[in-house]
Amino acid sequence: MTFLPRLYAIADTSFGDPVRLAQALFDGGARLVQIRNKKAGAREFFDQVERILHQAPGDASVIVNDRVDIARMTCAAGVHLGQSDLGVREARRILAVDQIIGFSTHNLEQALAGDKLPADYIAVGPIFPTSTKLNPEPVVGLEKLATICKSVHKPVVAIGGIQLENAADVLAAGPRSIAVVSDLLSASDIRARAREWIEALSL
């Protein structure tokens, strides 16, 4: 699916102002950016997404984490939902027909269930140990990731603890995209790091 470039960047507020982070990712060439703010109230998050959409390049897509209502009202490209968020079928009823839905899964059983839902892609993780989740799910690993990629029909986004040094091994397991948080946002130069990722994943 064309809306999923190899690099799926995530602007997570635990690393700073999401508006500033998103701008740096866009400047570095990222063209799919998820906005993740687990602590903000609805008004603050809405305002942040609006500002990010206003500054986003014309060929960029912005995904809202968790909040279907904010994705719908801001006309973002779509929403990303976790296992405990509003259901995918319910979200599909709320969103515009051209807005996309991503769905987080953590094992083969969840991925197979997600493959039957009206989601546009399935995220699988954590592939490796991650520090961006307070209570992360068990590590999936590359072998199980490969099994999931072969078992589902929807595009797979691999996420969780992935660094530039192991990205090639992750891609070899079969996902369409790699979602990156820490390895991008903890860099001293986020723009340069995004460019490194895009160059590496285009090979």
Image (spheres, rainbow, N blue to C red):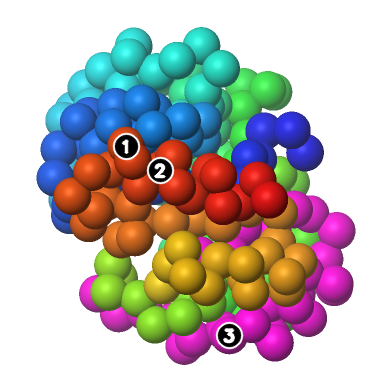
Q: From mark 2 to mark 3, how far is it between C-alphas? A: 24 Å
The disc label shown at residue 68, or none? none
- Secondary structure, mark 3, is helix
The residue drawn where x is 43% and y is 67% is 163
Quadrant of the rendered structure where residue 54 is?
Answer: top left
Q: Which residue is mark 2?
A: 194
Return the x and y of residue 191 as percentages of the image width and height.
32, 37
Residue 200 shown left or right of residue 15 in the figure: right
Is-magenta flag for residue 142?
A: yes
The disc label shown at residue 191, or none? 1
- Asked if the residues shown at circle 2 and circle 3 are in contact, with their CB atoms under 8 angstroms apart, the answer is no
The relative height of residue 171 versus residue 180 in the rendered view (above or below) is below
Closest to the observer, 10 or 29: 29
In the rendered picture of this protein, how many numbered marks are placed on residues?
3
> What amino acid type should be assigned to the residue bearing mark 3?
Gly
Quadrant of the rendered structure where residue 194 is?
Answer: top left
Closest to the observer, 103 or 148: 148
Closest to the observer, 106 or 92: 106
> What amino acid type should be assigned to the residue bearing mark 2?
Ala
Q: From mark 3 to mark 1, how far is it between C-alphas? A: 28 Å
> What amino acid type should be assigned to the residue bearing mark 1?
Arg
Q: Which residue is mark 3?
A: 141
Q: Which residues are magenta?
A: 134-160
Of the residues tagged 3 and 1, which is closer to the observer? Answer: 1
The residue drawn where x is 23% and y is 43% is 189
Quadrant of the rendered structure where residue 52 is?
Answer: top left
The residue drawn where x is 14% and y is 45% is 16
